[in-house]
Image (cartoon, rainbow, N blue to C red):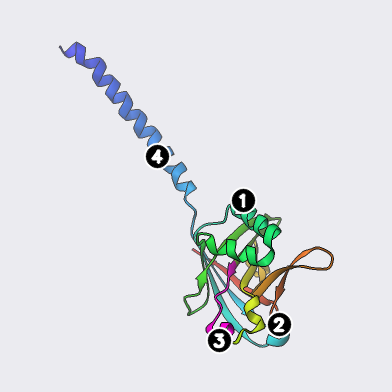
Amino acid sequence: MTNKLLPVILTCSIAVATIAVFLPVALKVYAQDIPKRETIQATAMGQTTATGKSFHVTVNIESYSTPEDQKLLIDAFTSGGHNALVRALSTMKSKGRVAITGTLGYQIAYIRSIPTENGRTIRLITDRPIKFAEAYGSTRSKDYDLSGMEINIAQEPKNSDGSLIVAGKFKVDKNQQVSFESYGSGPWKLVNIMERD
């Protein structure tokens, strides 16, 4: 009777040993598939008409947009211009939040991280909430219903920089090039960029 159980016990022991060896590997691979949350803080410095003004910005990244997200936006812009792009952005799942420090801010609709020779560039765009006074007064600013940010993170932190357009819109210029036009004070320069864990 003992001799008959020995092969079954050995088979079970080998199965348990195999699971014990490969389970940590499987868990490690799964953990790498989960996006690491990131927090980036910066100071936005005014330029042109906003010279001398500054505020702090915090970007909380939960995940990055996919190539499929990018294609969806390109297709939307190609078929219907800026307004179609804004509609497509409004349907996208949030990838995080961007906020002026001390406020709730708003959701990031699209964000990509692009490797560079000296680090990486993060580009994000999101639909900007239109304030009641803008909508009621039907001011020109309501046509600039997107916000965009580019953060260049260098291996040497002191060389990191970027820019922020608080209110912008995509347009095709006379040379048939797509540009992101800023409303009002123009782009804000991002300095003191810090990655937080």
Give the structural element (helix, strand or loop) at label 4: helix
Q: Nearer the viewer, mark 2 or mark 3?
A: 3
Q: Residue furthest right?
A: 175
Separation of disc 2 and disc 4 at Cα? 52 Å
Q: Does the magenta stretch include residue 131?
A: yes
Location of residue 164 (image quadrant): bottom right
Question: Residues in magenta?
Answer: 126-135
Disc assigned to residue 24: 4
Rendering coords of residue 131 (x, y %): 54, 81
**Sequence-wise, which precedes: disc 2 or disc 3?**
2
Q: Earlier in the sequence, mark 4 or mark 1?
A: 4
Rendered image quadrant of residue 74: bottom right
Residue 82, picture quadrant: bottom right
Q: Nearer the viewer, mark 4 or mark 1?
A: 1
**Separation of residues labelled 4 and 1 (CA atoms):** 30 Å
Q: Can residue 110 be seen in this view?
A: yes
Give the residue number, with chain letter if any, for mark 2.
47
Give the residue at mark 1: 67
- Residue at mark 3: 133
Q: In which quarter of the image is the N terminus?
A: top left
Name the kind of residue labelled 2 in the image.
Answer: Gln
Q: Given the image, on which type of amino acid does mark 4 rest? A: Pro
Q: Is mark 2 on a helix, strand or loop?
A: loop
Taking 12 as reference, is 165 left or right? right
User: Residue 58: x, y in percent?
Assistant: 53, 72
